[in-house]
Image (cartoon, rainbow, N blue to C red):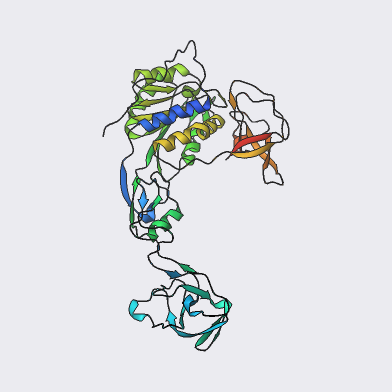
């Protein structure tokens, strides 16, 4: 398989004289462009029952009309509107009964002036052109009285009404839902082509980190980012690979990254090496022949060290603290992962909200503070307050928060009642 890599760095990095910070939209675009430049994931054919949540590899169109025949959408009487001559009401004879799924040989003869009682789903044939529900007629033995002339094809789902032959029904890149499975099953598709799962490997760095379940020693803390990321990445279109924890050591990192690129399409690194000691990751990536995509980003919390490509894999380096890692994933990571997986569905758009707090404008970088819902206004728009005591390492506030607010780099002071844009967790 040919791997297309970005061989020209987007910009050179001067660690002593840090370059202009990238805005969040700039960093997102660079990451998505890099993800889109890499070789596409292979495809595989799966049965419909296990396709939910997978990424559709090619557009789906129908080769037969949907539905294939005219069918009754409710119980009633199939009539010929041409038999309703003159002013109503009209009394017609009942010539027989149509059941759903009947064979052609089982159809009763329906002559002019006659009607057929029908079940929901029964095929409507010949010159019968409307179905009148039982509730609006009066039946008496072998006759039925109709009081109002229905419109043509009333209560009939006509052949090709949902989709004519050759209609594009599902686009390539769609994450298949249970509703899509119903559509595909209705088209008679037993199997479908999907993209192979995106392999995402997670690696934590930090000499102070130890695995959850291990007794803490002095100066140690449990690694919470990898369990958090594993839970967030638990999606049908992703295969998660756990690479564990390594110490803040350039040699260990240089050994781990090439192994990771051989097993994964995307590598997510979190911890002290990615968030604080910039030279370790940057110099290691350069030594391994990686191509830098982005380095410093003007956002709080956040400012991940870098994004890069290495041996055909995309590397996302997140801050070591869980609040920053969460927000960076929401603002950058997920869109980049979705582009790498060739997903065409749009991300959920941020919602509107109203501030119930004050904040002094701090121009120069975007801010994404954690918030909780205080109330919901009469228009249904949430009223938000800042999470008290929230900081980049506060796991309790992260768990309690309802989401985070998007504050532009050049925002004015925020007053109570100011309109906001926010992402709900």
Q: Position of residue 89 (x, y in %)?
A: 57, 81
Is residue 396 something one can see in this rendering? no
Above-or-below relation of 114 to 128: below
Q: Quadrant of the N terminus?
A: top left
For the C terminus, the quadrant is top right
Tell me where residue 357 sits by quadrant.
Answer: top right
Q: Locate residue 107 relative to residue 118 in the image: left or right.
A: left
Q: Is residue 11 visible?
A: yes
* Nearer to us in this view, 320 or 189: 189
Provide residue 164's location: percent of width, then percent of height: 38, 58
The number of numbered discs placed on residues in the rendered structure image is: 0
* Residue that lies at the very extreme toward the top in this rendered image: 16
Q: Where is 255 relative to 396, above or below?
A: above
- Farthest-out residue, front: 86
Q: Which residue is at 41% across, 55% downward?
A: 181
For residue 335, side relative to residue 289 (left or right): right
Which residue is at a point 46% across and 55% down the rendered structure image?
A: 179
Kindly identify the residue that appears in the image at 37 percent across and 65 percent down: 68
């Amino acid at each position: 398989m040919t791997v297309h890599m970005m061989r020209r760095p987007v910009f050179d990095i001067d660690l002593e004289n840090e370059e202009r910070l990238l805005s969040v939209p700039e960093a997102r675009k660079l990451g998505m462009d890099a993800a889109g430049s890499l070789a596409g994931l292979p495809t595989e054919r799966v049965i419909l029952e296990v396709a939910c949540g997978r990424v559709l590899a090619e557009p789906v169109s129908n080769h037969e009309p949907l539905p294939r025949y005219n069918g009754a959408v409710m119980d009633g009487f199939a009539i010929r509107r041409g038999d309703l001559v003159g002013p109503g009401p009209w009394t017609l004879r009942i010539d027989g009964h149509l059941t759903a799924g009947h064979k052609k040989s089982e159809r009763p003869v329906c002559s002019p002036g006659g009607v057929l009682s029908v079940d929901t789903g029964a095929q409507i044939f010949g010159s019968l052109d409307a179905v009148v529900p039982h509730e609006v007629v009066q039946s008496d033995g072998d006759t039925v009285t109709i009081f109002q002339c229905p419109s043509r094809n009333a209560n009939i789902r006509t052949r090709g009404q949902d989709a004519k032959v050759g209609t594009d029904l599902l686009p390539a890149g769609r994450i298949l839902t249970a509703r899509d499975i119903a559509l595909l099953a209705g088209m008679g598709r037993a199997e479908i082509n999907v993209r192979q799962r995106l392999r995402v490997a997670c690696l934590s760095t930090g000499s102070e980190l130890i695995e959850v379940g291990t007794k803490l020693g002095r100066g140690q803390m449990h690694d919470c980012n990898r369990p958090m990321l594993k839970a967030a990445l638990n999606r049908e279109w992703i295969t998660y690979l756990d690479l564990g924890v390594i110490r803040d050591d350039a040699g260990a990192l240089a050994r781990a990254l090439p192994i990771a690129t051989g097993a994964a399409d995307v590598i997510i690194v979190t911890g002290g090496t990615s968030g604080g000691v910039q030279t370790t990751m940057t110099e290691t990536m350069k030594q391994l022949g990686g191509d830098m995509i982005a380095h410093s980003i003007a956002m709080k919390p956040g400012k991940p060290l870098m994004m890069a490509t290495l041996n055909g894999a995309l590397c996302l380096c997140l801050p070591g603290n869980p609040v920053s890692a969460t927000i960076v994933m929401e603002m950058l990571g997920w869109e980049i992962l979705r582009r790498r997986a060739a997903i065409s569905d749009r991300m959920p758009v941020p919602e509107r909200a109203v501030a119930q707090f004050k904040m002094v404008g701090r121009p120069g970088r975007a801010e994404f503070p954690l918030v909780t819902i205080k109330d919901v206004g009469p228009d249904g728009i949430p009223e938000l307050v800042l999470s008290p005591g929230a900081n980049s390492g506060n796991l309790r506030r992260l768990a309690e928060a309802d989401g985070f607010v998007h504050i532009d780099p050049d925002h004015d002071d925020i007053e109570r009642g100011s309109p906001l844009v926010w992402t709900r967790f």
